[in-house]
Image (cartoon, rainbow, N blue to C red):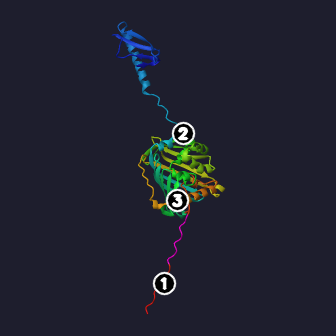
Amino acid sequence: MRTAANHFLFVGRPFEPDTATFAHGPGWDTGFMSLTTVSLNTVSPNSVRRLLLAVLGLILLVGCADAAPTAPAGPAPDALIRAAAEQTTGAGSSRFVLTTTTAIGKQNVTLAGEGAYDYAKKVGRLTFDIPGPGGRAGGGRIEQRLIGNDLYLSLPQEPNAFYKLSISDVAGTSLGNSTDPIASLQALAGVGEVHEVGTEAVRDVQTTHYAGEYDVAQALAQAQGTAKLILETTLGKLSLKRVPFEAYLDEQGRMVKFVQRLELPASAQTANQPVVSTFTLELFDFGTAVAVTAPPAEEVKDGAPLLAALRDVASASPARSPASSPAVPAPVPPDPVPPAPVPPAPVPPAPVPPG
């Protein structure tokens, strides 16, 4: 047993009967120690009593010191946030729900989508409900099927047809941000100030709630792969320097909920209207099985005309509003090849009256 001042007491293993043996010295951890043996027969009872009380005091001192070890400090909040994207994809797969509310002037538009994605196999599906005129329901639905580098996109104008595009081709367009459900988490590589808010349950999962900001320039510099191109096409064309966010991490450090708010003042870039866009992403059912199949061949159309239209929009818009940032799904492009109108049926001839 170790005691104060690098002294040790050997209890229960006396070298000789009726003795107490001590080890002491500055080199106890390297083997350089001295031994001192005290005979209990050659001292008075009072001396023995004082010796035993001293030994008992040393034992209690060591016990108290060992009972309250210093807890190691955990990772800093900014380190946890930077690692969240990798920790999340490390789960293999998940389901997700995302909601975006964009206020342009006095008009609010809310888009809601849900899906599932396998981060290892690169397969997933996503559906968006598109609001109708005035923000009312009934605008139709967008469906996306992601299989490797293939994107199958169904638009409200043609719900029974799928345009086939390459994900690498559309990454630099307004459609790119919706092909990667967690591309926005790559922006957290630029996290700056962040602090812990508290704990909160999200979909019955206990999480730690953090709040902070990320630096847009740093986020673009450190993002990788397709996500980098997506962020450059969206955040890179905005005038924002920093973006506030809130992150909710589970015990494994995975992102369970992510909220970011993009604000642009009224300017020519925003059609002279202030724009505020709030994006909320929730991830759950980590490790879920994700099965996605390509549409039947007869429902698949060449996506080249649609890709050309998306690129024309991108080149004609030097600066975008948050409506086409990673926080918002891509707008519904017009049908590149509208079907010919169906002519009205001819008027049947009048019946011949009987003679």
- Residue closest to the far right: 268
Residue 339 within the segment the image draws in magenta: yes
Task: Tell me how far mark 3 sits from mark 1, CA to CA.
Answer: 43 Å
* Mark 2, residue position: 78
The amino acid on which the numbered mark 3 sits, given as a three-letter code, is: Asp
Q: Is residue 177 found left or right of 12 in the rendered image?
A: right
222 and 106: which is toward the camera: 222
237 and 199: which is toward the camera: 237
Q: Is residue 272 found left or right of 49 in the rendered image?
A: right
Task: Tell me how far mark 2 sits from mark 1, CA to CA.
Answer: 80 Å
Q: Main secondary structure of the magenta part?
A: loop
Q: Considering the numbered disc 2 on the image, is that residue within a helix, a strand or a loop?
A: helix
Earlier in the chain: of badge 2 and badge 1, it is 2
Q: Considering the numbered disc 1 on the image, is that residue within a helix, a strand or a loop?
A: loop
Question: Within the image, what quadrant is residue 216 found in?
Answer: top right
Q: Which mark is residue 225?
A: none
User: Mark 2 or 1, which is nearer the eye?
Assistant: 1
Earlier in the chain: of badge 3 and badge 1, it is 3
What is the span of residues highlighted in magenta in the rendered image?
337-345
Q: Is residue 309 found left or right of 257 in the rendered image?
A: right
Task: Tell me how far mark 3 sits from mark 2, CA to CA.
Answer: 45 Å
